[in-house]
Image (cartoon, rainbow, N blue to C red):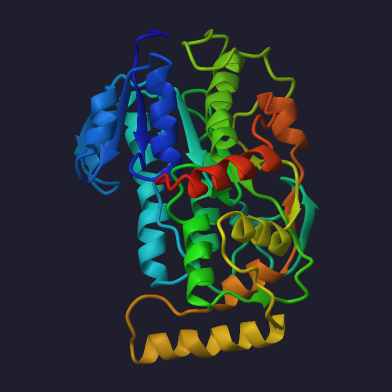
Amino acid sequence: MNPTAPVFITGASGFIGGKLTERLLAAGRRVRVLARRPLPELEKLGAEVVPGDLHDAAALRRGCEGAATVFHVAGRVGVWGPAADFFQVNVEGTRNVITACRAAGVPRLVYTSSPSVVYNGGDLRGVNETAPLCTRAPCAYPTSKAAAERLVTAANGSVLATVSLRPHLVWGPGDKNVIPRVLALARSGRLKIIGAGTNRVDCTHITNVVDAHVLAEQALIAVAGLGEPGSSRPGSATPATPPGGRAYFITNGEPVVLWEWINELLRGVGLPEVEQHVSLRTAYLAGGVLEALWRVLPLKGEPPMTRFVAKEMATDHWFDLAAARRDLGYAPRVSMADGTAALIAHYQAGDQL
């Protein structure tokens, strides 16, 4: 493989895609990114922006041309919206990326999936990759991501090697979604503990998520016997279990009591701890009613509660990292304690995250 061959990243305007782009550029890699708008900060670092989206075949082909690896990070996220919109972006967009990879002869595809693909409406405790992919959920995000992951797995072969990563609740500097949303709800007085408040949840610091993407590429290269193209971390030995066609849960490996962790953050930034409880049954029923109102009226934005959010905020969901450790050499570098302390320090300093 040509060590100067570029990588192509979709979703570079987002949290994971942007941080992955920064990491690879810092490591001296050539990086192309697909974007619907200019990304001046990444361009200053040396990224080549390919204008377009996941439905622009010409843009995808241009990005894939001569690429060593495609990191498909882009997707529609959220807990509300028409199912057709989620499937159009997450499933058909992924199908388009796979088609472009094949047409351009790209040897590797690393796909950013989600643990939501194994959503079952209940607790997920120590679940590994043998858990079945979901086909039904209260919103289209889990089912659309599961369908997309199926496409990526099926695409794996001798010409195109694929791997899917499932990072859970990604947070850290640069996050504009998970933690900022929690803090906004707390400031408005609308944040309430759903259920008993003892549910344990896996979270993943952004540094560890980017590590996993780099390691996934390295593992695919090692299996193919093509050597290391130059990255920010040392390569590892050939995996005992080839990663091609497989999916991996990616977390910090330190499940936290969700509401205790949220209250630690709130204390750290000078906000009152959340103490009010609402039962899971009440939150779930309220979510169903609000969803119906938003569909019928329809109202702008998303409902303040949905059935999916009620379940996610009240149930256990933590995962077994054994496969990622074994096949990818994954080992979380930033702990929950260190990452949380650093995040609080940033907020206390008034830094923009």
**Residue 121 placed where, x, y %?**
69, 70
**Residue 45 placed where, x, y %?**
29, 24
Q: How many marks?
A: 0
Which image quadrant: the N terminus?
A: top left
**Residue 192 placed where, x, y %?**
62, 76
The residue shown at (38%, 37%) is 18
Residue 62 in sight from this viewpoint:
no
Residue 203 in sight from this viewpoint:
yes
The residue shown at (57%, 9%) is 225
Q: Nearer the viewer, residue 221 or 98?
A: 221
The residue shown at (33%, 87%) is 298
**Residue 210 placed where, x, y %?**
52, 32
Q: Nearer the viewer, residue 341 or 140?
A: 341
The residue shown at (47%, 11%) is 230
Left or right: 206 as drawn, with respect to 80: right
Left or right: 211 as drawn, with respect to 64: right
Left or right: 208 as drawn, with respect to 35: right
Q: Quadrant of residue 274?
A: bottom right
Name above or below for residue 134 compared with residue 99. below
Q: Nearer the viewer, residue 144 or 184?
A: 184
Q: Quadrant of residue 301?
A: bottom left
Name above or below for residue 199 compared with residue 213. below
Left or right: 102 as drawn, with respect to 346: left
